[in-house]
Amino acid sequence: MTQPFVHPYLPNSAPDVKAAMLAAVGAESIEEFYVDVPSDLRMDRPLDLPAALVAEQDLVRHVEGVLNKNRSTKEKLSFLGAGTYNHFVPAVVDEVINRSEFLTAYAGEPYEDHGRFQALFTYQSLMAELLNMDVVNVPTYDGYQATATSLSMAGRMSGRRGVVVVSDVLPDKLSRVSDFVRPNLDLSFVPTVNGTADVAAAVALVESRGDEIAAIWVETPSYSGAVETAIRQLADAAHSVGAILVVGTDPVGYGVITPPADQGADIVCGDIQSFGLHQWFGGAHGGFIAVHDDPKFVLEMPSRLFGLASTDVPGEYGFGDVAYDRTSFAMREDGKEWVGTAAALWGIAAGVYLALMGPQGMADLGETLLARTRYAQQQLAGLAGVTLTDDALHLREFVVDFSGASVTAHRVVSTLRAEGIEPGVVVGEYELLVCVTEVTTQADIDRLVASVAAVLNTAAANTSAHTSANRSANTSVNTEEKSA
């Protein structure tokens, strides 16, 4: 008789354990337990796992072998961006968040953790100053969730479903946001012109559907790094029909760029990964939502807020929750949406980073990013057959097109990867999204340009040789025909 397979380190694979679990939920079989999951979403084969290893040291060796295949951006020259960025993380950031008082994802509980509350209050205050907003939340899971939540807030406040998307959005972000808001909101898209919003088309769409529109959604910098210059006009268009303007952004440039709040934005949201958080094979991410000091907006925010309050002792202050009863922590299943605390530690990290940088440091960072982005654009666009895809102002990222050189973006990536360079993210057959940060030096950019030039020159030489060979063959054929 064949014995049922029990995995050596998966106790739930034991038949008696499975039976007990099924009995606890009232299901007679695994198939009945998963009946609500559509069949096309279920895996119809076993997981592709190695044979079970008996000894722990064998398992450790196997896992280490898998992990050793990873290569970090410290080992290669990287121009990768698209949502997770290689910014410098000062040593003091890691020193602070690795202290035992902070080293947990959780935000702490009322009356027991005022040090963490104060740290997060400081983060909120520094973010609010940078964004020129009044209220900033304790971080949500990531920037994707923050954006989806911001749009949901607009829908709840207006009682409408329509959202007009006027920017090029990172595809992964658009996918997650769409999944999140699909039950309650409908997204309409206005194609960009030269990298930024087509204001006339956006205004026309909003005016034609005025009583359906909850929000206009702007991304700046956009997926391609383009900085939106028409935020004021878009805000006016939204406000004219009783809608709001939601701006998704990376705040890394607001030491020099005018923040969206000064241009009419009602909600500003995004990710804080650029502020003292490592890339870490996918990044440490935390989402922020910033609004004006308006109870209508503040009471729609689902995550925690920490405020400064006086105590019973004169001259002493404490830190605690603001409007705690609106959160999912207090309302549980009756909450407007659920928000976990998995990113609270990253709020403290970002707070340490912002405190260290200060206004002048953020201004220097913004100027450096703009200058190095422009330098990289000019140098790459100076190569024969290479063009920029738009003329907009770009911060940190931009797209180059190799179609004029008849070289695919995949070819550029595969060739340069062999040289220890990650030149960017392929976004089209001939298009490459290139990212530079403050850790990308002029010498790094020059090395990238020289390596790309070598790829293009090799391709041009091969094309020329192929053409010459064809001409010689044709000439030989014609000579033979004449002789005949």
Image (cartoon, rainbow, N blue to C red):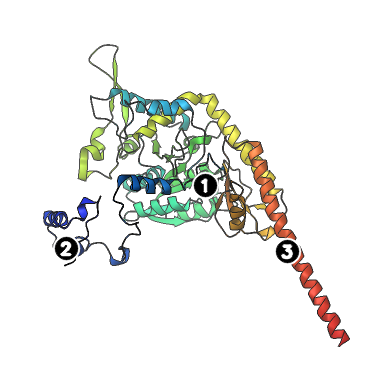
Label pair 2/3, CB-CB below 8 angstroms: no
Residue ranking furthest to the bottom: 484
Q: Residues within 10 Å of mark 3 (few under 14, many from 20)?
A: few
For mark 1, give the secondary structure. loop
Measured as percent of width and height from the top left, residue 470 is found at 77, 72
Disc on the earlier residue, 1 or 3: 1
Disc on the earlier residue, 2 or 3: 2
Measured as percent of width and height from the top left, residue 161 is found at 35, 54
Nearest to the observer: residue 209 or residue 202 = 202
Task: Work out which quarter of the rendered image holds the N terminus and state it.
Answer: bottom left
The residue singled out by tag 3 in the image is 463
Nearer the camera: disc 2 or disc 1: 2
Q: Residues within 10 Å of mark 1 (few under 14, many from 20)?
A: many
Amino acid type of the residue that numbered disc 1 sits on in the rendered structure: Ser
For mark 2, give the secondary structure. loop
Among the 4 quarters of the image, the one containing residue 142? top left
Amino acid type of the residue that numbered disc 3 sits on in the rendered structure: Thr
- At x 21%, y 51%, the residue is 11
Q: How many labels does the image show?
A: 3
The residue singled out by tag 1 in the image is 222
Amino acid type of the residue that numbered disc 2 sits on in the rendered structure: Ser
The residue singled out by tag 2 in the image is 29
